[in-house]
Image (spheres, grey):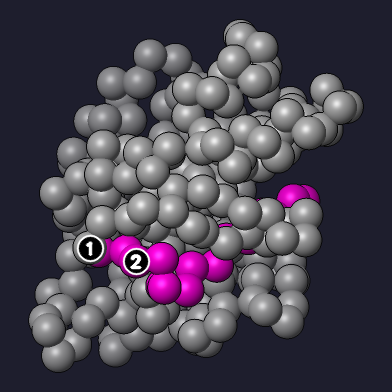
C-alpha cells in the first residue's frame, strides 16, 4: 500500500490541511482538480515520519535513472532519503492533477531553464497552449514541500525558524538586504523577534527569486525590497529589469504550521 504525501491548500480565502489517502499503486493516485487562479496548493512531507523501507523502495522505482544516480551520490543516508522523498513528492504531486490525460509519476520528464529552475517538459506546450501548471519545491532537514499553481510561475522557500546565524544579525543583513529592509530590522529591539523577522524576509526574498526563474545572479537580493504589510503577507518594490516591473502585482505569503 502506498501512502501519498500530505497536501495543504492555501488560497485568499482558506487554508486547509487534507488527510492522507491510501491507494494501491502510483498509477491509481486519486485525481484532483487544478488550483483555481487564486489558489496555491502546498504539498508537504516530514522525512522523520517516513520509516517504511518498502515504501521508500517503491518511491525509488518512479525516479528516472539520472535522479537515482543523484540520490545515490549523496554523502549520507539522511541526505539520500531526503533527496528521494523530494523527487517522489514532485512526481506524485504533479501526477494527481487532472490536466488533459492521466499521468503516471514515472513518465514525467523535467527540463531546466537557462538559470537552472526545473520545469515539467510538457509534450504539447507551445505559445497557444502554455504549461497547464507550475510548481516549485523547497526543503529543510525536517520538511520537504512542493507548491503548485496555475496562471503564473511560483516560488517556494522553507527555512528552519531556529536557524542559527554565524554572524551578528545586522552584519548578516547588511550583506543581502536593502536600505528599507535594514531600517525595519534595526527598529526591532527584541533580538528574538529581530531574528524571526530576518528569517521571514530571507524566506520571502528567496521565494521571489525562485518564482522569477532567473536565479540569484539575475535577481540579487539587494535589487528588490520586501515590504511586510500585516505581519504575514508582503509586496515587492525596487529596481527590476524588463522581465518584472514595479507595476506587476506580486503576492508573497509567509505560512507557518
Where residue 229 appears, as percent x and y from the top left, is 72, 60
Quickly name the residue at label 2: 245
Q: In the displayed orientation, state which residue is furthest to the right.
A: 190
Count of numbered circles in the view: 2
Q: Is residue 47 visible from the viewing direction of this image? A: no
The one nearer the camera, 60 or 176, is: 176
Screen quadrant of the N terminus: bottom right
- Do tag 2 and tag 1 residues touch (Cβ < 8 Å)? yes
User: Is residue 243 positioned above or below 216 on the image?
Assistant: below
Task: Identify the residue at horizontal 57%, vertical 62% (top origin).
Answer: 235
Residue position marked by numbered label 1 in the rendering: 242
Q: What stretch of residues is rendered in magenta?
A: 243-257
- Res 27 → quadrant: bottom left
Does 106 lie within the magenta span?
Answer: no
x and y percentages locating residue 102 in the rendered image: 32, 82
Residue 245 is inside the magenta segment: yes
Residue at 34% across / 85% down in the picture?
Answer: 99
Please indicate whether residue 242 sits to the left or right of residue 138 in the image. Answer: left
Helix, strand or loop at mark 1? loop
Amino acid at each position: 500500500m502506498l501512502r501519498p504525501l500530505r497536501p495543504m491548500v492555501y488560497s485568499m480565502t482558506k487554508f486547509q490541511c487534507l488527510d492522507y489517502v491510501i491507494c494501491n499503486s502510483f498509477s491509481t493516485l486519486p485525481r484532483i482538480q487544478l488550483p483555481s487562479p487564486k489558489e496555491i496548493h502546498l504539498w508537504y512531507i516530514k522525512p522523520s515520519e517516513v520509516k517504511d523501507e518498502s515504501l521508500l523502495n517503491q518511491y525509488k522505482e518512479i525516479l528516472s535513472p539520472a535522479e537515482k544516480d543523484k540520490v545515490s551520490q549523496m554523502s549520507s543516508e539522511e541526505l539520500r532519503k531526503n533527496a528521494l522523498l523530494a523527487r517522489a513528492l514532485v512526481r506524485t504531486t504533479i501526477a494527481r492533477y487532472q490536466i488533459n490525460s492521466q499521468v503516471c509519476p514515472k513518465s514525467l520528464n523535467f527540463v531546466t531553464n537557462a538559470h537552472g529552475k526545473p520545469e515539467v517538459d510538457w509534450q504539447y506546450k507551445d505559445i497557444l497552449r502554455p504549461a497547464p501548471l507550475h510548481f516549485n519545491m523547497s526543503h529543510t532537514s525536517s520538511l520537504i514541500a512542493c507548491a503548485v499553481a496555475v496562471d503564473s510561475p511560483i516560488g517556494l522557500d522553507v527555512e528552519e525558524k531556529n536557524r542559527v546565524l554565524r554572524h551578528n544579525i545586522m552584519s548578516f543583513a547588511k550583506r543581502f538586504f536593502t536600505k528599507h529592509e535594514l531600517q525595519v530590522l534595526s527598529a526591532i529591539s527584541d533580538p528574538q523577534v529581530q531574528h524571526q523577522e530576518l528569517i521571514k524576509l530571507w524566506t520571502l526574498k528567496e521565494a521571489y527569486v525562485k518564482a522569477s526563474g532567473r536565479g540569484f545572479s539575475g535577481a540579487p537580493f539587494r535589487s528588490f525590497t520586501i515590504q511586510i504589510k500585516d505581519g504575514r503577507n508582503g509586496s515587492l518594490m525596487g529596481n527590476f529589469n524588463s522581465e518584472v516591473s514595479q507595476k506587476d502585482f506580486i503576492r508573497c505569503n509567509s505560512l507557518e504550521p
